Image (cartoon, rainbow, N blue to C red):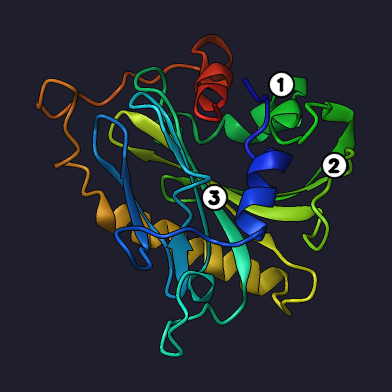
């Protein structure tokens, strides 16, 4: 199992070109037994070949819809980038309940290891982090080997709750796309808003069809937070 959210082989699949969903572009993937919906901003479509849904966890990759269809009317994103969504296993703590602990967690060895392609905490620089309501945002730079050619080594990520699961969303800007830091963060905020809108909290059902109870607040370092995120990377 990979120890980072963005593995080189998966990213190479996406950068090589998107796949097809139902014979045409799709900007939404519904994954896991809870039917978690991952919806991308305009011009971004799911790559079904690189997306994995294990039922308990899932990993979704999205790229330029224009790579999916020969039609000249296919929408393209204003600034091409690579978008990812990792859906964790159920249970444990929540982002909202632990929002104050997240800066300390990601500054820790385990947190920085989570952000590294190679699982090397010493190769990660935390640049910025902040919370907006129940969503935690961070920007990090990964200096470990294996950087995908054409993709910047710094990226924005967001962590949020969808029912009893944690969803991690990422934006990887392409070096030649003209997508600057402010644009990357704006794109990530749009991605977050779409995922939240696609998953009303009172309609995310458990495996038995019942709406899950809110998880009890527990500390990140004694609740398996790190393991839950890793379980979603496959």
Of labels 3 and 1, the one closer to you = 3
Disc 3: which residue: 84
Q: Secondary structure at mark 1?
A: helix
Mark number, residue 110: 1
Label 1 and label 2: CA atoms lie apart by 20 Å
Q: Are marks 3 and 1 in contact (CB under 8 Å)?
A: no
Of labels 1 and 2, the one closer to you = 2
Q: Quadrant of the N terminus?
A: top right
Q: Residue 86: where, in percent of width, then height?
A: 49, 39
Q: Residue 55: where, in percent of width, then height?
A: 33, 27
Q: Is the residue marked by circle 2 packed among few (<14), some (14-19), or many (20+) residues within 10 Å?
A: few
Question: Quick one: which residue is furthest to the top in this view?
Answer: 222
Of labels 2 and 3, the one closer to you = 2
In this picture, is 33 found above or below 172? above
- Disc on the earlier residue, 1 or 2: 1
Q: Residue 35: where, in percent of width, then height?
A: 24, 39
Q: Are marks 1 and 2 in contact (CB under 8 Å)?
A: no
Q: Residue 152: where, in percent of width, then height?
A: 80, 60
């Amino acid at each position: 199992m990979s120890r980072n959210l963005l593995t080189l082989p998966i990213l190479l699949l996406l950068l090589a070109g998107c796949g097809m969903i139902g014979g045409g572009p799709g900007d939404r993937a519904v994954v896991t037994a809870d039917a978690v919906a991952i919806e991308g901003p305009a011009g971004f479509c799911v790559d079904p070949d690189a997306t994995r849904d294990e039922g308990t966890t899932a990993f979704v990759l999205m790229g330029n819809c224009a790579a999916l269809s020969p039609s000249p009317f296919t929408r393209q994103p204003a600034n091409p980038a690579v978008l990812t969504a990792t859906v964790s296993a159920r249970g444990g703590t929540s982002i909202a309940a632990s929002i104050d602990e997240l800066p300390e967690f990601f500054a820790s060895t385990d947190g920085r290891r989570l952000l590294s392609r190679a699982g090397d905490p010493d190769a990660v620089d935390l640049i910025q982090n902040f919370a907006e309501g129940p969503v935690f945002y961070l920007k990090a730079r990964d200096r470990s080997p294996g950087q995908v050619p054409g993709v910047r080594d710094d990226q924005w990520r967001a962590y949020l709750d969808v029912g009893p699961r944690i969803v991690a969303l990422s934006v990887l800007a392409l070096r030649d796309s003209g997508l600057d830091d402010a644009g990357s963060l704006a794109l990530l905020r749009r991605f977050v808003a779409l995922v939240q809108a696609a998953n009303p909290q009172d309609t995310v059902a458990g495996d038995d069809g019942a709406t899950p109870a809110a998880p009890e607040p527990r500390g990140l370092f004694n609740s398996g937070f790190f393991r839950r995120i890793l379980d979603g990377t496959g």
